Amino acid sequence: MTTINTTPIPPRDKRLWWRDSVTYQIYIRSFADANGDGKGDVAGIISRLPYLKKLGVDAIWITPWYPSPQKDHGYDVADFMDIEPDYGTLTDAKKLIEQSHKLGIRLLVDIVPNHCSDKHKWFQEALAAKPGSKERDRFIFRDGKGENGELPPNNWQAVFGGSAWQRITEADGKAGQWYLHLFAVEQPDFNWQNQEVKDYFEKVLKFWLDLGVDGFRIDVAHGMIKADGLPDVPSDPKLLEGKPMPFWDQDGVHEIYKEWRKILDSYPNDRMAVAEAWVHPATRIARYLRPGELMNSFNFEFLGSKWDVAEIKNNINKSIEAIGAVGAPSSWVFNNHDVVRSVDRFDLGLGLSGGTTLERHGDVNKFNLERGRKRARAGALLMLALPGGAYIYQGEELTLPEAREIPEDRLSDPRWKMSNYTDRGRDGCRVPLPWRSNTAGAFGFSDNAKLTPNDSWLPQSNNWGDFSVEVQDSDPNSSLNLYRKALEIRKSLSGLGDGPMSWVDAPDHVVAFSRPGDFYCYLNLGADFKLPQAAKVLVSSSPIENGILPTDTAVWFTLN
Ligand code: GLC
């Protein structure tokens, strides 16, 4: 038995909530539609708070709900201190914060500091102003290369595909400067060397903290600072000599978080922030979690694990070692609105790499829905038994698969167009949730009973009703009830959540570990495995008969 995670921490009832919390991600556009327009909204979330309470989550994180032209579904923010009219009003937001708190559920908002919408007031001012002006300095404008400035300032590529630079037409009608957009063309990057930008975001943070939110999910937390001189990316990645890309994970971002931490700490009730930092290895994630910086950072290496014992164990070990070394808790996650759902990934043996539809989504002809769901349920028990906190993405508790039938003319992720129509992008994990088995109101997603599954902003799959909350609620063996049960047990056992864990000797196809209080989690990825004779099963992801743990199954048990 090898004990890992030996960081000394206080007992559960004495430690900060974000060391143990299970946070539920709400992709607002697809969660629940109260005003009947086929898009989710704030009132829809309010109406489902009892559902979230019963599920047993500690907190919710709401994806961007700000006014936005929706070129990247809210991650192109036009006004950071208001609510998108399609989603409601600031009064609705206040009501949601209050009502969540009444139920003991904390609430995080998504802050997008790397870029804004091209319709943001500042960017419009920058376009109207001259090169070299203070308005342009809030963004990253440069003259182009080539005789007439017709070539982009450097070779950086946008995350969604194509050059990361867009040339503008100046006020006099002539082709002019270029601006940087690491994501869509409509998402200009802010210049974080500019004091006004820094001051502005401090104001934005305080605005939401004053309204009562418990913290922030920080979008592209590793992106705000660009290397001095905006150097080209070398043609051969080896030439980076282990250094990060010139636009990711630069040391300067940590200076920002030290300032933000002071703001968070100046408010009562332990406000927090979680970083969306796609950096690796785990030691780079840990840098965001050093004392005086952020509280959580998504564990994307874990998310990217294939359905493979060695890979899963290795990612757990690396994460706990690196993150424990700075005294922080790990934040486990298998799903979010940017990745193919784990039901499909685990079944098809997919990691996270790949730039084409086939590489990213796998071969649908090989997909086995039942096996995928079985694996995702097992994965859930694994994740919820690990030391630290966890993040669940809406629909994960229903083991919803990726929606694969969205017609091409309905795909709306900017990645589809920017990849030159080679990568269908992320819409398949963003399809509105099925609440009822009947198709009325798009399977109960909308309060407007007239809406069909094809009328919601992204069309739902024909079989969506089979996964609905209604169907699962009454089935004791459903995925929904598995999550409810696991979360209840997790709450009742003080050895779960953050704290030590020990690997237990087991065959190569089994992941086995213990937690304080004689608690054990075993996950079997191969041949039948006989559990210890004395095992008293608390919950299992698939039925266990005669003490045999079947393949693709996880179990929680105690020994005394
Ligand atoms: C983050 C978001 C993603 C968005 C991107 C640009 O990665 O999770 O959905 O497209 O940032 O804001």
Image: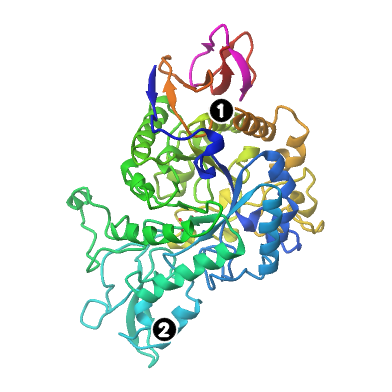
Report which residue position mark 2 lands on.
127
Please tell me which residue lies in front, 17 or 151.
Answer: 17
The alpha-carbon separation of the residues under discs 1 and 2 comes to 52 Å
Locate residue 454, reporting x and y percent: 70, 55
- In reply to whether residue 279 is colored magenta, the answer given is no
Is residue 537 in the magenta section? yes
Instruction: List x then y, in percent, for residue 109.
Output: 56, 58
* Residue assigned mark 1: 378
Q: Amino acid at mark 2?
A: Leu
Question: What element does badge 1 sit on?
Answer: helix
Magenta residues span: 523-541
User: Which residue occupies 56% across, 36% down?
Assistant: 13
Q: Position of residue 461 (x, y in %)?
A: 67, 47
- In the rendered view, does 278 fall on the left or right side of 338? left
Question: Dot 2 lies on which element?
Answer: helix
Q: Which mark is residue 158?
A: none
